[in-house]
Image (cartoon, grey):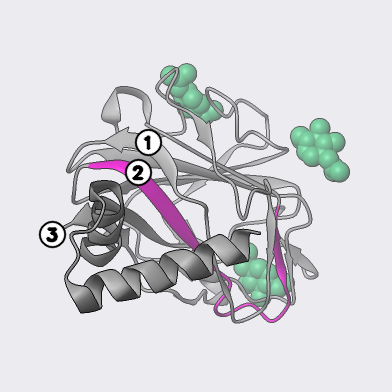
Amino acid sequence: MKLTIYRTLTLFLFLAQVQSVPLDLATKDANDFRRHSHWVDIWTAMPQLTEPYNLPPTPFNSSDTIFANTTIRQTFQVTQNADKIRLRLSNAFGIDDLAVSKVTIGLPLHQQAGISALEPGTMKELSFSGESGIIIPNGGLAVSDPIDFSINVQSNLMVSIYLEQGQTGGAITGHPGSRVTSWMSFGDWTDAGNLTDSSVTAVDHWYGILEVSVTMSN
Ligand SMILES: *[C@@H]1O[C@H](CO)[C@@H](O)[C@H](O)[C@H]1NC(C)=O
Ligand SMILES: *[C@@H]1O[C@H](CO)[C@@H](O)[C@H](O)[C@H]1NC(C)=O
Ligand SMILES: *[C@@H]1O[C@H](CO)[C@@H](O)[C@H](O)[C@H]1NC(C)=O
């Protein structure tokens, strides 16, 4: 049924274009959106294989797993206003699959970079093809579903990633030269206002996230 409608519509559009019949306005708007909108990166970092000395400290780094049962909370400064964004997570340099259990985004408290406290009421959970987590194959990338989220140019975005199983194989994708502090804690703290577990640790590196992008029209 759907297919028939689609075929009829395609045929109609084809005929409409060939015969210069004015298109229905709604169809024209949808086509204009598809033709003129695209995703633009508003934050990105070059992914690289994290060197052994830039891996997280023990106990987040052990001989068999990195970041097991760990929430990683990081901040990123974006370069454009956005009201709909999506994230790209990277396992480009992993040797094994990376199971991402849950990801939330929010704004850091008082717009401070490199802190672990969330501005209350700003947290939203991301999904991946409708699921809360995703398994990223080694060498792969995962793009989250677009989410309505407002952020202004040069503001800081907070991203919390929970890895239940962590990364095995000893290799993890990151960008060590973050020049901003990132936080980690055992347990799922993706929804938390702050990280308050006794395991909380801070490092000046970024892990696992590659891009924040926004839809733009031109
Ligand atoms: C992490 O663990 C690996 C493997 O045991 C080790 O080579 C590396 O030096 C450790 N890095 C840190 C920062 O602890
Ligand atoms: C994960 O860490 C939390 C916080 O330390 C702890 O309560 C929980 O038992 C841990 N879960 C596993 C499976 O180790
Ligand atoms: C948030 O937690 C961190 C680490 O536990 C702590 O240093 C900081 O003071 C806390 N911030 C707030 C606003 O509670």
The label number, if any, that marks residue 84 in the structure image: 2
192 vs 153, nearest the viewer: 153
Crowding at dot 3, Cα within 10 Å, few <14 / some 14-19 / many 20+, comes out as few
Quick check: marks 2 and 1 in contact, CB under 8 Å?
yes
Asked if residue 85 is among those painted magenta in the image, a careful observer would answer yes
Where residue 106 appears, as percent x and y from the top left, is 43, 33
Instruction: Give the vertical position of 169 relative to 24 (above or below).
Output: below
Mark seen at residue 218: 3
Disc 3 to disc 2, how far (Cα)?
A: 16 Å
**Could you tell which of marks 3 and 1 lies nearer the N-terminus?**
1
Residue at left offset 68%, top offset 75%: 137
Question: Measured along the vertical axis of the image, is residue 209 above or below residue 53?
Answer: above
Q: Is mark 1 within 8 Å of ligand 3?
A: no
Q: Amino acid at mark 1?
A: Phe
- Element at label 1: strand
**Rendered residue at 20%/65% (across/down):** 21
Disc 3/disc 1 C-alpha distance (Å): 20 Å
Q: Residue furthest left?
A: 218
Would you place residue 110 above or below residue 114 in this image? above
Q: Quadrant of residue 11?
A: bottom left
Task: Give amino acid for label 3.
Answer: Asn
Q: What are the residue bounds of the magenta stretch?
A: 82-100
Left or right? Give the position of 23 relative to 174.
left
